[in-house]
Image (tube, rainbow, N blue to C red):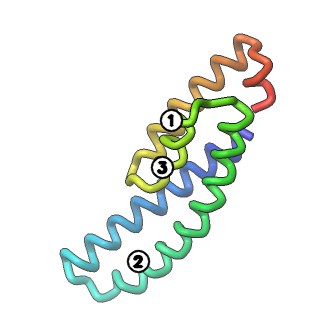
Amino acid sequence: MLTRYRVMAYVTGVLLVLLTLGMIGKYLLDIDAATDFTRVVSIAHGWLYVVYLVFAFDLGSKAKWPVAKQLWVLLAGTIPTAAFFVERRISRELEVEVADGSPVAAKA
């Protein structure tokens, strides 16, 4: 379950960075090709963000995270580069819990 979350966090993070760069190219640099690029990337990010939400919510539910932590993890896919930092922090926390033998973390 952690692996699914990690993969989707990276995919969502990369797509969001690409979308941000595409928007900069489209609106600030006035690059014509950026319009099609942002359309494709925004659709891909939108659909894959939904998958990320499902995986992150599933992981948080099984790990019994507090609501605030769950919301932060869910919103990380909407802030450019945040998904990378949040994913790393969550992975470290869960790896420590698994190493300690926590029964909740072992399910996650």
- Mark with earlier residue (1, 2): 2
| Crowd tier of the residue under label 3, counting other residues whose Cα lies within 10 Å: few below 14, some 14–19, many 20 or above | some
The nearer-to-camera label among 1 and 2 is: 1
Most distant residue in the front direction: 67
Q: Amino acid at mark 1?
A: Ala
Question: How many numbered discs?
Answer: 3
Q: Amino acid at mark 2?
A: Thr
Residue 25 placed where, x, y %? Answer: 27, 75
Mark 1 lies on residue: 68
The nearer-to-camera label among 3 and 2 is: 3
Residue 12 placed where, x, y %? Answer: 53, 57
Measure the alpha-carbon separation of dots 3 and 2.
21 Å
Of helix, strand and loop, which one carries label 3?
helix
Quadrant of the drawing holding the N terminus: top right
Of helix, strand and loop, which one carries label 1?
helix
User: Which quarter of the figure has residue 50?
Assistant: bottom right
Which residue does the image show at 42% across and 86% down from the upper left? Answer: 36
Mark 2 lies on residue: 38
The nearer-to-camera label among 3 and 1 is: 1
Of helix, strand and loop, which one carries label 2?
helix
Mark 3 lies on residue: 75
Tell me if label 1 and label 2 are in contact, CB under 8 Å. Answer: no
| Crowd tier of the residue under label 1, counting other residues whose Cα lies within 10 Å: few below 14, some 14–19, many 20 or above | few
Which residue does the image show at 67% across and 18% down from the upper left? Answer: 97
Which of 82 and 74 lies nearest the eye of the viewer?
74
Measure the alpha-carbon separation of dots 3 and 1.
11 Å
Measure the alpha-carbon separation of dots 1 and 2.
31 Å
In the image, residue 62 sits, relative to residue 54, either above or below, namely above
